[in-house]
Amino acid sequence: MLHSVNQMQRVAIAVWRGYVSTTLDFAGSLLVVDLEGRKEAATKVLRLAGDSLQSIASRLEEQGIDVVICGAISQWLGHRLEMRGMIVIPFVSGRVDDVIAAFAAGTLDDGRFLMAGCSAGARAAWRRRTGSGPASRP
């Protein structure tokens, strides 16, 4: 499990029309969710339209984001987020409410949240390459 039940985490999810956006690099907005344990404490929308990749990384750091959940993501942006201390969980798809609930419950690795066209091996390869994601955290 990525976080303990009593730990507060700020999670950013790339969104489009109620679903996880297919690519973080081009997302128009992020849903920022503060989780206290397994419950949502607060949410807000962070608009990104037209932001450069460097700007996205900086804005997420300024917002105190701990975890980024997204569909696809460029290696460049993923690396910049991880260098700033964020955990990146890529290749996720589904309704945002379901993804938040699965993350909070520690079940985001369920195959139904795997982005179409990606295998579970793609997410595992990302974790091996970057050291990020639920499988590499206590």
Image (cartoon, helix red, strand yellow):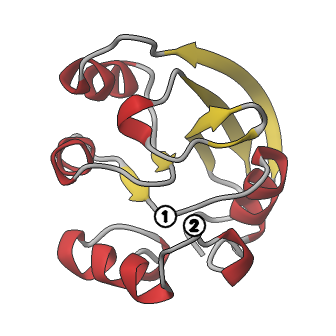
Question: Does residue 22 appear left or right of residue 132 in this picture?
Answer: right
Q: Position of residue 19 (x, y in %)?
A: 73, 43
Up/down of 98 relative to 51, above or below? below
| Mark with earlier residue (2, 1) | 1
Extreme residue in the bottom direction: 121
Residue 82 visible to an observer of this rendering: yes
Question: Does residue 40 appear left or right of residue 79 in this picture?
Answer: right
Please name whichever residue, 42 or 100, is drawn nearer the observer in this view of the structure: 100
Quarter assignment of residue 15: top right
Report the number of discs: 2
Question: Does residue 136 appear left or right of residue 37 in this picture?
Answer: left
Query: Label 1 neighbourhood size at 10 Å, few (<14), some (14-19), many (20+)?
Result: many
Quarter assignment of residue 51: top left
* Helix, strand or loop at mark 1: loop
Quarter assignment of residue 137: bottom left
Disc 2 from disc 1: Cα separation: 5 Å
Q: Position of residue 72 (x, y in %)?
A: 41, 54
Which amino acid, mark 1?
Phe
Please name whichever residue, 16 or 68, is drawn nearer the observer in this view of the structure: 16
Up/down of 75 relative to 123, above or below? above
Residue 136 visible to an observer of this rendering: no
Residue at the spot 35% in from the left edge and 35% down from the top edge: 25
Q: Which mark is residue 91?
A: 1
Residue at the spot 45% in from the left edge and 16% down from the top edge: 48
Please name whichever residue, 67 or 93, is drawn nearer the observer in this view of the structure: 93
The answer to the question of whether label 2 and label 1 lie on touching residues, with beta carbons closer than 8 A, is yes
Q: Which mark is residue 26?
A: none
Q: Position of residue 103 (x, y in %)?
A: 69, 61
Extreme residue in the front direction: 117
Q: Which mark is residue 115?
A: 2
Which amino acid, mark 2?
Met
Query: Label 2 neighbourhood size at 10 Å, few (<14), some (14-19), many (20+)?
Result: many
